[in-house]
Image (cartoon, coloured by chain):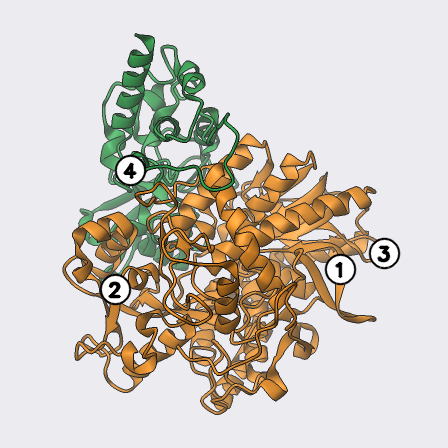
Amino acid sequence: MSIPTRHFDALIIGAGGAGLNAALQLAGAETSVAVVSKVFPTRSHTVAAQGGVNAALANVLPDNWHWHMFDTVKGSDYLGDQDAIEFMCREAIPTVYELEHAGVPFSRLDNGKIYQRAFGGQSQDFGGDQAARTCAAADRTGHAILHTLYQQNIRAKTHFFDEYFALDLVRDKEGTICGALVLEIETGEPLLIEAKATLLATGGCGQVFRTTSNAHINTGDGCAMTLRAGIPLMDMEFYQFHPTGIAGKGLLITEGVRGEGGFLVNQDGERFMERYAPRAKDLASRDVVARSIVTEVKEGRGAGEHADYVLLKLDHLGADVIDKRLPGIRESSRIFAGADPVREPIPVFPTAHYQMGGIPTDRFGRVVMPARYGSEEVIAGLYAAGECACASVHGANRLGGNSLLDILVFGRLAGKDIIDYVRANPHRRETDPASLEQAMARLTRWEYTGDGVPAHQLKAEFRKCMEDHAGVFRTEEVMAEGYGKLCELRERFKDARLADQSKVFNTARIEALELENLIDVGLAIAVSALNRKESRGAHSRPDYPLRDDVNWMKHSLYYRDGDRMDYKPVRTKPLTVESFPPKERVY
Amino acid sequence: MKISVYRYNPDVDQKPRMQTYEVRPVQGMMLRDALLEIKQQDESFAFRHSCGEGVCGSDGVNVNGKNCLACITPIAELSEPITVRPFPGRPVIRDLVVDMTLFYEQYRAVKPYLIRTDSLPEREIAQSPEDRDQLDGLYECILCGCCSTACPSFWWNPEKFLGPAALLQAWRFLADTRDQATDERLDALDGPYKLFRCHTIMNCVEVCPKGLNPTRAIGRIKDLMLEKGL
């Protein structure tokens, strides 16, 4: 098989915050690096992050990284790995300063320091008063950060392959991963990119659900590639539903609205979060607030004609604060909800938002899996960072403001570790023709014409199925039925066909490849959820309403082959401080 | 409602054509939703899109003669018949997908990154809220290209005039009190074309989906050049 081939020290797949921050480290170290992105880098979904990035800078209220660590461990419902969490919360502070130095236009306080706002699940002094830890650029923080990182990569002359779609990882004859087969979207031609180290930074998979805050491109590509390579995905049952999506649309309304003083009311105008979280109220953790909203609606207290949403009220903040701190929200609400929040509340309902689980890594971004000598053996040359990875710092529920932090900290660290790895392993590896053929089969499979169901028809059915059977509340019955339907969809997908066989910018073909990824990742979520018989963080089971630390304080590992589950222990020992033992989680 | 879209696939078409589709309008439908509906009917139809909320800048198109972002353009605000074409003046790759290479090159040409010569502090570089306010209306650019591809000066001199999007970003860094490369940036914009081909036609202002004002930014750069020249 003759396929054009390029060689680099490092290959980064994905150009969001994690990929770009990793690239910046590598480019600065004179390491040859290729960044492959299926969209122009500034279109990556980091751009849509609104509220901000957490770091205990103490610019507004007293703070310290140890309190941040406590909140993150508690927020994770004690499923997060405490060594990785300690590391992230410590690194947060220099990371945010580095970003500011790189040019991020953070909002400012009167003393010239970075503006910080209150966010959900944050406290001072290990569970005390509300903290203000989220560094913000108005409500466009992700946009500001992504553009700055891309700009710095321009300065560093990083080599980009824009609008190239990654088909699959490839291996050498010894089985070591040595790059990826990619597809140039414009020409439809394949290209083999060989590299000594490969970083997956492909972001989330929100498109598995029908109603989501995620973009069209968030299709779990890196996670699915990992599964196909025989590597398990970790903790995939923990999928976050953000409490405040615009009702019926799914578009995100930042937690920053509540951080700035907005609150939720039901049809009676009652501030119902006071009943569910007496202390933190609207700034309880996201899983808590999302469940409260769904409960209000289920019990008939929803607002609107069909009583199927609640209202987010912020008019009392006044036009000045809204225009200064939440201008993007005002714009989105006017356009998509027809409501100007300066005068009227925004109709909201939980929306699929973030995968806490993902590709298992250690805190250096190295992919790990169970092997001969333990449950966390490093896979040489393969890295993952950002939403597609699971370090695990979010455990069963992520705190707002910790996602931008995760991508920046672990993207940077993965970049640094790759530099060392490439220096220690300077030899080029050659792709095994059998491995390349397998990757090519993903593409050539779509050349079969004849009878079959159009690929795009299955997509809507699949996403509806995930929404109905793996949502905010999950029972055995509902999930088992969903799993059955998904297995059937997986079978039918084998007969999916493309009518459009042209090569140039064939988006139907890209979407078919993405759907294959979505189905693999959807099954990882469904099977992991079906097997976890407890309620923890975002995984809420009315049939097992309590957290079960005796049997279930462990990470799930899902293997695609045979839909098999395995488990590994939570790392409860931090790096330097005392462990936070599991406690009842109240807000 | 009927929507007429520009179709061209170099694999099969000799020349471009317009094709009309019937789309059922629903409450709150955006142009992107309508284009997705067309794609359901005809999978060979190609256009770029992603976030669906006007922040990624992927789905800029020309509708009824005016550039816009499809995902935040309500169908109800468009007069029928609705005609959707690719951005003017850019080579068409397929259907509504155009080659934006030159647009990105111009962006890169203005060194769109903070340049600092002083040593960096251990904390943040201080900036007053008033100084930070100078960046509002500049940093929000999403690089969709609506402005530059609506600019006659850009159509006529695409290789020489940098275009409104790149110049807006040039001013974004000139306006940042943390940046220390003012002279270098101004020198790079000198000459009859790069900056001075702007004839304040203001198409850019009219079409910007984020409500930004590249013409004003260009004016500020010219003012600063004069000030420095004196």
Q: In this view, does B17 lie above or below A72?
A: above
**Which residue carries the number 4 mark?**
B133
- Answer left or right for A536 relative to B64: right
Judge depth for marks 1 and 2 and give the one in front.
2
User: Pointers 4 and 2 in contact (CB under 8 A)?
Assistant: no
Q: What residue type is labelled 1?
A: Ile
Q: Please state the horizontal and vertical placement of residue A468, each as a whole percent of the image.
A: 42, 79
Q: Which of marks 3 and 1 is in front?
A: 1
Q: In this view, does A95 lie to the left or right of A284?
A: right
Q: Name the residue under label 2.
A: A262
Task: Provide the residue designation for mark 1.
Answer: A379
Are the residues flagged by discs 3 and 1 from a single subunit? yes
- Residue A559 is at least partly visible in this image: yes
Q: What element carries label 3?
A: loop
Task: Name the image quarter holding residue A25.
Answer: top right
Q: Chain ID for label 1?
A: A
Choose mark 3 or mark 4, whichever is in front.
Answer: 4
Q: Circles 3 and 1: CB distance less than 8 Å? A: no
Give the mark nearer the N terminus: 3 vs 1.
3
A96 or A436, which lies in front? A96
- Report, in whole angstroms, how far the alpha carbon at label 3 lies from the one at label 4: 57 Å
Task: Tell me the green chain.
Answer: B
Numbered disc 3: what chain? Answer: A
Disc 2 packing (10 Å; few <14; some 14–19; many ≥20): some
Q: Where is residue A532 in the image (x, y as percent from the top left)?
A: 57, 83
Residue A499: in sight, yes or no?
Answer: no
Q: Could you give the CA–CA distance between mark 4 and mark 1, rounded to whole angstroms?
A: 48 Å
Q: Give the labeled residue for mark 3.
A: A174
The color chain A is rendered in: orange
